[in-house]
Image (tube, coloured by chain):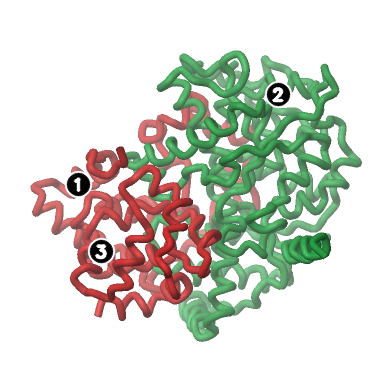
Chain colours: A red, B green
Amino acid sequence: MLFEELEKDYRFKEGYHTCINCGTCTAVCPAAEFYRYDPRKIVSIVQTRDDAQIEALLRSDTIWYCGECMSCVTRCPRRNGPGLVIMALRDLSVRLGYFTDSEKGRQMLPLTRTFSRNILEYGYCVYPETFAWEDHKESGPVWKWHMDHLEKSLERQGANYKGDGPGVLRKIPQESLDELKAIFDATGATERIRLVEQKSAEKAREMGLSLEEYERKAFTYSSDKHFNE
Amino acid sequence: MIYEGKQKIWQDYQKEIPDDHWYFVRSCIRQNFFPGSEHMFTEITQKVLGRDMYENPYHTTCGGIAYHCDTLPQETAMTIVARQFALMTEAGYENYVASCITSFGNYVEILETWHEFPELEARIRELLWTSCKREFRKPKYLAHTSDLIYHWRNEIAEKAKVRLVDCHTGAPLRMAEHIGCHYAKMFPSKGVGGAEYPYVLAGMIESWGGQVVDYPERRHCCGYGFRQYHMQANRGYCVSNTHKKFESMEPYGIQAILTNCPGCAYFMDRWQYVIAEQTGKTYGPDGFGIPVLTYEELAGLVLGYNPWDLGLQLHQVAVEPLLDTLGVPYDPDAKYLGLNKEDLLRPELPKNLKCF
């Protein structure tokens, strides 16, 4: 039944054909070098069509290790895309609410909150006001300086920050933001946000955390179990 | 026979790029981290090269980053893109150019999926009409902004005030190029040179006098990984991948890196800073890093623009040694000034990575 659900996903239709389990995808995979992650094994599990094994996958950290670089697509001798299979598995894990069972899956809450707000409030995926230096110290002292002088630094570089008309970081007109909201409502994104919030709240209660504590932990905490030796 | 076979393969990876009349959409990452590059793309294409590059202020994010962070259903991502195409259609254009590799990959993936599954395209058309009362035609030509700079590279070379040559020795500048995963790894035929022999950046470097240097991990991912970066807990993944690339290129004496993808430019710059601060290791000479440039920044230097007008002050890796090598004039005291020479103070200096 879970396999049949995966088969409805167009990414699965595109990325899952006749895998011969050669392991080329794993050999070139940046995630497989870093995490205890093996895309060949994931596709192998999916090939079993066994509900119990696929459900275990959907509840695990494993499916969240992929960086979606799609290097596997280039190299697969059968033109499969394990990265596309991963996208379908992640989508199903969210729809079934299984994502809260894994440390990496629980990152869906901060990710969904960040990107939904950025898109619906500003019209961008990334936006200066929500990209705090304190949460991105790798951006260096130059980014801190830039953020401390944001309007003037952007002005110096020809941006039209929050301005009308075209240009860099212009204000996205309200009519456009309204259309994005209408698209979210019509295509399932609004329902996705509600589901992620609901399942995350349930898990936070189970873990004895406030939702804000749960969100912060998902954003910052990494246990040691994920990494290769 | 073998030569002819190679010629045929190469022709399969050439890309038809119309010379004018483009509908331009912007990059979320670049507008934040390299605003000067976003500004310079229209400056160079419109004012220097005299091309029609139309930007509709009503366009938005394509949603690609959110999609690859798994926060958007596929139909949502597709309908946002369908709206972008509708705006292009309403403006009377058919050539569509995006200034982001994630966006470019997203557009290619969507168009190819619709080609394979026409019923899905029909469904998205319904969803767009339901939500926005808009209709669209698909672009006749789809390009990434670097495709256009590549297409016009020789025209830029004719106007060059600076060549990619060491002004002290006359030797070509030794450059690495990084094309970014979503440019051609999924759909190789959509990028100049494909995934095996990508030429979009190499063509610029050669045309402007530099030398392209190969190294073992040239095609390895920069390590962005979408959710791997946007979650603080996962960023070890990102820096590990960049570290692998820099360790691989270290023996080859690379003087600058040219990037295609907004994320790659940012990460390969910033992770050098992190590696230096954490381990003390730097990859350029004398405690400096290796400058990582966007193609507009490089084109702008070649065309003689002031480096601070290009936004090079927003790099964490100091660009001054590169400017000195190329003989590019600059005012070091003006680096962090605002408009009208307003004093905006200066960033703190890193402990290990040498900066100005």
Say the numbered circle drawn on residue B322: 2
**Residue under numbered circle 1:** A214
Q: Residue A125: in sight, yes or no?
A: yes
- Density class for disc 2 (Cα within 10 Å; few <14, some 14-19, many ≥20) is some
Do tag 3 and tag 2 residues touch (Cβ < 8 Å)? no
The amino acid type found where label 2 is placed reads: Leu
The amino acid type found where label 3 is placed reads: Leu
Q: Disc 2 on helix, strand or loop?
A: helix
**Marks 3 and 1, how far apart at CA:** 20 Å
Q: Is residue B92 left or right of residue B129?
A: right
**Residue under numbered circle 3:** A58
Q: Residue at x 47, y 45 (%)?
A: B224
The amino acid type found where label 1 is placed reads: Tyr
- Marks 3, 2 in one chain: no
Query: Which of the 4 image quarters holds residue B12?
Result: bottom right
- What chain does badge 3 belong to? A
